[in-house]
Image (cartoon, rainbow, N blue to C red):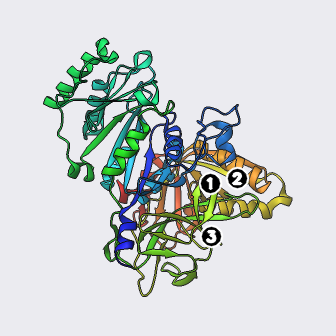
Amino acid sequence: MGNDFKNEVLSRRTFAIISHPDAGKTTLTEKLLLFGGAIRDAGTVKGKKTGKYATSDWMEIEKQRGISVTSSVMQFEYQNCRVNILDTPGHQDFSEDTYRTLTAVDSAVMIIDSAKGIEEQTLKLFKVCRMRGIPIFTFINKLDREGRTPLELLAELEEVMEIESYPMNWPIGMGKEFLGIYDRYYKRIEQFRVDEDKRYVELNEDGEIEGEHPLKQSGLYDQTLEEIMLLNEAGNEFSRERIENGELTPVFFGSALTNFGVQTFLETYLQFAPPPQGRNSTEGKIDPMSEEFSGFIFKIQANMNPAHRDRIAFLRICSGKFERGMTVNLPRLNKQIKLAQSTQFMADDRSTVEEAVSGDIIGLYDPGMYQIGDTLTVGKNDFQYERLPQFTPELFVRVTAKNVMKQKHFYKGIEQLVQEGAIQLFRNVRNEDYLLGAVGQLQFEVFEHRMKNEYNVEVIMERLGSKITRWVENETVNESLSAQRSILVKDRYGKLAFLFENDFALRWFQDKNPDIKLYNPMDDYQ
């Protein structure tokens, strides 16, 4: 494949955007797509009544509620780079989808609301990035509104996140007095709400505006120079190596809604974000420059095209080159598959992809064969990439079809939606009842909505409350151990598990049944 292949791989930038709900994540995604020429008109999430929806929110319930509940994948080209953005759900009830998405990226962009600072969900996701050693770039948003002081935000970032920061630019004022940003990296000032030809003001060697300029009349300009001096003398030093190791986060200030500071962020990000990185497997780390194709499936989405009732498996290519029609191995099933139908995405708008390389995310038509975490290889390779986290569900419902005549659709809907991995299916060993488990309540609401709208089945969901789930290592367990406070179930793979009412019930069971070995799959990811 030679140099062309290597250059293609090196041009890839694959990242996820993480944040708390309402910090401006989907809005920033839209603006990045705008610069990439992928869309002509950015719709913010809030603009629901206008009928203009965000490109990355394709599911009906997302349009109605103004939230992102699935991880969208979007691709565009900018300044000789092929950018793959994974826009993750911010809502904590969908953190499982987000965690898995973070296994498929090489860097992450963290958005912080300048008024609210670091919020709980952002912290959780940040910790996952730290655990995986993913480089993190920070965009502090909503500078056009009143918020906390930049120094306060930086101090919180360093203290709470336990990471050092380097501001690439610095705001001049905020809210109604927001005048622009002082760009430390490009040595210029980018002015807010001025004509395009006046947007950038170059700085001299001392980091100041040469000669006369209206900005110099503002006390905010002098205040900014003082703060820049403080950052230069007492702040952290810039280090590309420490950024790549996830030890230093470059910080950018701006306003996604008014499209200010976004282009500067994108151009700087592309310079410092890593190209595709090696991935751990059962045969050690796989080099993205290896010419033999391999990848793993990190997400499955049903009914992206409701007219066709299709299912798409999202594949992260980790090495080599994908070519449509190629034959690959699925080691889990010891089977060979021809990849004839492949797509790339702009939210729900997709086109057939003929070729793709390491770092790219593509969609494969799934006839019901793939599972989240599946590895695809070629030739004699039968290694597996690292297992993806399977969350332990905390909330449970018993689910039945309202209309008995719709049982066929009910079973099909459950089977397909469960394969996406957001909800987990269990069968009560004693009475065969269908039980659904999820990390958060909103998952059940989305499930109910989609069953009705995509499968034409109304469901009855009876709440069982919160449970502690523990899987059983033993192959057989006496059914008589199933009780009200410790329900014995089988997951969709036929593995046995207990749903305990609380910690006390779990401890009591373990004391009484020391020969039964219980485990929590998430223990591997703590």
- Residue 399: image tag: 2
Q: Residue furthest right?
A: 405
Q: Which residue is mark 3?
A: 366
In this view, 234 is above or below 108: above
Q: Residue furthest bottom?
A: 380
Q: Are marks 3 and 2 in contact (CB under 8 Å)?
A: no
Q: Position of residue 341 (x, y in %)?
A: 62, 72
For this rendering, which residue is in front, 242 or 486? 242
The CA distance from mark 1 to mark 3 is: 23 Å
Instruction: Give the foreground label among 3 and 2.
Output: 3
For this rendering, which residue is in front, 79 or 295? 79
Confirm whether residue 274 shows in the render.
yes
Q: Amino acid at mark 3?
A: Asp
Q: Amino acid at mark 1?
A: Leu
For this rendering, which residue is in front, 22 or 408? 22
Q: Name the residue at 33% across, 63% down.
A: 277
Confirm whether residue 491 shows in the render.
no
- Residue 436: image tag: 1
For this rendering, which residue is in front, 511 or 245? 245
Identify the element where label 1 is drawn.
strand
Quick check: 390 left or right of 218?
right
The CA distance from mark 3 to mark 2 is: 26 Å
Q: Position of residue 312 (x, y in %)?
A: 61, 64
- Residue 144: image tag: none
Q: Name the residue at 46% across, 82% down.
A: 378
